[in-house]
Image (spheres, coloured by chain):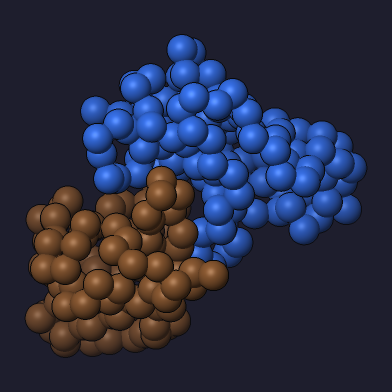
Chain colours: A brown, B blue
Amino acid sequence: SQTIHQWPATLVQPVGSPLSLECTVEGTSNPNLYWYRQAAGRGLQLLFYSVGIGQISSEVPQNLSASRPQDRQFILSSKKLLLSDSGFYLCAWERTGEAFFGQGTRLTVV
Amino acid sequence: KQEVTQIPAALSVPEGENLVLNCSFTDSAIYNLQWFRQDPGKGLTSLLLIQSSQREQTSGRLNASLDKSSGRSTLYIAASQPGDSATYLCAVRDFGNEKLTFGTGTRLTIIP
């Protein structure tokens, strides 16, 4: 069966520090991969998606970036975090039309 | 641009009641529609997926319907239980689009 791993579960980082969130999928190949952000009291905002290795589409201009170094690995990064980057970050995968989500990372920028 | 709306934003019902959650979308040219459940501080759990050619899907006490022509989907929960308390989100995928468009969800509280 397919599983998705996302870590860390929680993260507190100072303003201006770098960020790296990792997501890996097991049990499937060539999935579409997604990074979403969910701010308090708001809906899910699609940040990035990838249909293959090295192929990244950005939905929202910001100081975040994403990379897909391997087929089932998706990384969300920032060189310098802003207070506004705080939120709940969710990774998801999809291959046959149905999306599956990880357990999320709660990021607090202080 | 596809827009997805879920009304009401919050709903409280006594345990044991049947209930219906609503989802509407503006563009009927969808590939599929998916219902999710989100517990506080957790990720999304997929509940039901309805393809555009289908009218409904069932899983246990859950039944989801799809009416593309009217741009609506409903999630029916039978014999509600306190464990059903969560936020329910619907999302649509348009044809030729790898992206999901989400509603803002309905926060459901089942009162014991």
Question: Measured from the top left, where is residue A92 in percent x and y?
Answer: 38, 62
Residue B76 image point, x, y percent? 71, 34
Q: Is residue A77 visible?
A: no
Using residue A94 as the reference point, say whether residue A70 is left or right of it. left
Residue at horizontal 81 percent and vertical 55 percent from the top? B82
Q: Position of residue B96 (x, y in %)?
A: 24, 35
User: Residue at left 21%, top 77%?
Assistant: A70
Q: Residue visible at 18% across and 72% down? A: A68
Question: In the figure, A23 relative to B26: above or below?
Answer: below
Q: Is residue A27 visible?
A: yes
Q: A62 above or below A26?
A: above
**Picture coordinates of residue A20, whole percent (x, y):** 23, 83
B15 vs A105, left or right, is: right
* Residue in the foreground of this view, choosing between B80 and A14: B80
Residue shown at 50% from the left, 65% from the top: B43
Seen from the viewer's position, the closer of residues A93 and B17 is A93
Q: Quadrant of the N terminus of chain B?
A: top left
